[in-house]
Amino acid sequence: MEAPAAPHSPADRPADVRLTVNAPEQMRELGRRLAKLLRAGDLVMLSGELGAGKTTLTRGLGEGLGVRGAVTSPTFVIARVHPSLGDGPPLVHVDAYRLAGGLDEMEDLDLDVSLPESVVVVEWGEGKVEELTDERLQVVIHRAVGDTADESRRVTVSGLGPRWAGTDLGTLSA
Ligand SMILES: Nc1ncnc2c1ncn2[C@@H]1O[C@H](COP(=O)(O)OP(=O)(O)OP(=O)(O)O)[C@@H](O)[C@H]1O
Ligand SMILES: [Mg+2]
């Protein structure tokens, strides 16, 4: 049976997709699928507690985009640029925890790529990203249970703003 549409979502907003991801490799696979939906100028905001799997998802995204360099936690840098190995957009992986202000501060970092020509993935962007853009793909990852030994994660993907209107996120759960 079809899940009912969220009562307050505007008609042009794609239905949120909710997934259960049972292992790290599945999280990477989700990232690879997400990559197929992304193009230059897109912003992906990843939310979820410490160790939820944000970087693991980004690793798959990097694989899917075909970018250079291993995606690792950007903990000691604010942003890491992974250039495309082909002719696709670079991946800019941001740890917003270290950005005092918002994403506009990124313009001052002297990255050698332009954000509108990149796919930008932000971890820990809550409260810093929302005001700057209402167009983003939002991914929220929760541990299914509090138990840190449990590998299953609940993932919700939402497309916000005109960019995502009309995009079928259902391909992510295929
Ligand atoms: N289903 C799962 N999906 C993703 N990661 C999982 C899963 N099950 C177990 N893990 C493990 O959880 C850890 C997730 O770490 P990761 O660095 O991706 O999280 P994070 O959300 O980026 O954390 P941080 O908040 O520190 O940036 C990894 O060690 C990964 O192997
Ligand atoms: Mg991380």
Image (cartoon, rainbow, N blue to C red):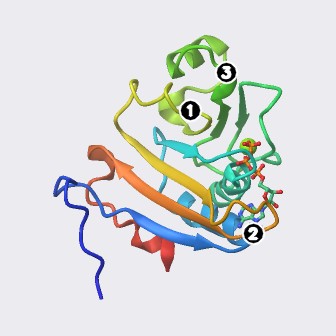
Q: Amino acid at mark 2?
A: Glu
Q: Quadrant of ligand 2?
A: top right
Outermost residue, left direction? Answer: 11
For the residues labelled 3 and 1, the Cα–Cα distance comes to 18 Å
State the SS at label 2. Answer: loop
Disc 2 marks which residue? 151
Q: Amino acid at mark 1?
A: Gly
Disc 3 marks which residue? 111
Please name whichever residue, 6 or 161, is drawn nearer the observer in this view of the structure. 6
State the SS at label 3. Answer: loop
Task: Residue at 38%, 30% (x, y): give it.
Answer: 133
Mark 2 sits near ligand 1, with its Cβ under 8 Å away: yes
**Badge nearest the viewer, 2 or 1:** 2
**Badge nearest the viewer, 2 or 3:** 2
For the residues labelled 2 and 1, the Cα–Cα distance comes to 24 Å
Task: Residue at 73%, 45% (x, y): give it.
Answer: 50
Mark 3 sits near ligand 2, with its Cβ under 8 Å away: no
| Image x and y of residue 149, in percent | 82, 66
Outermost residue, bottom direction? Answer: 1
